Image: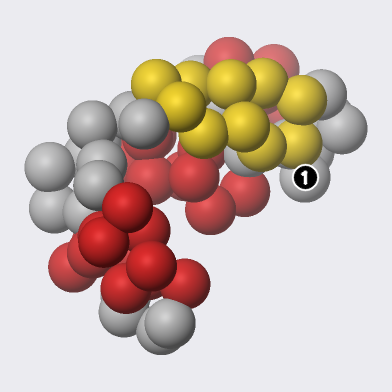
Amino acid sequence: MKVTRTSQLSGITRTMDLNITVQQYQEWQHGKPIQDAFPQLSASEREFLATGSTDEEWNELFGEE
């Protein structure tokens, strides 16, 4: 499913094709914790879904680990 989000960090709008279903998305929207709703997604993909932020943005602002 293609998901478009605007980053809370940069204001840039991006679209990512995520391996999620409409049912999973609806469950998350109705309060299911993101890690339970989308166990197949990486932490980076869940962050994009929740905040629109990417790893690159985090690294630019806060440095790499």
Would you place residue 24 above or below residue 58 in this image? Answer: below
Circle 1 residues within 10 Å: few <14, some 14–19, many ≥20: few
Rendered residue at 38%/67% (across/down): 26
Residue 21 image offset from top left, x and y in percent: 25, 47
Q: Residue furthest left?
A: 40
Q: Is residue 53 left or right of residue 44?
A: right
- Image quadrant in which the N terminus is located: top left
Q: Is residue 41 left or right of residue 61?
A: left
The quarter of the picture where residue 59 lies is: top right
Write down the residue under mark 1: 8
Would you place residue 20 above or below residue 18 in this image? Answer: below
Q: Residue furthest front?
A: 22
Would you place residue 32 above or below residue 37 in this image? Answer: below
Rendered residue at 32%/73% (across/down): 27
Rendered residue at 62%/32% (across/down): 4
Residue 9 image offset from top left, x and y in percent: 78, 38
Residue 54 image offset from top left, x and y in percent: 56, 26
Q: Secondary structure at mark 1?
A: loop
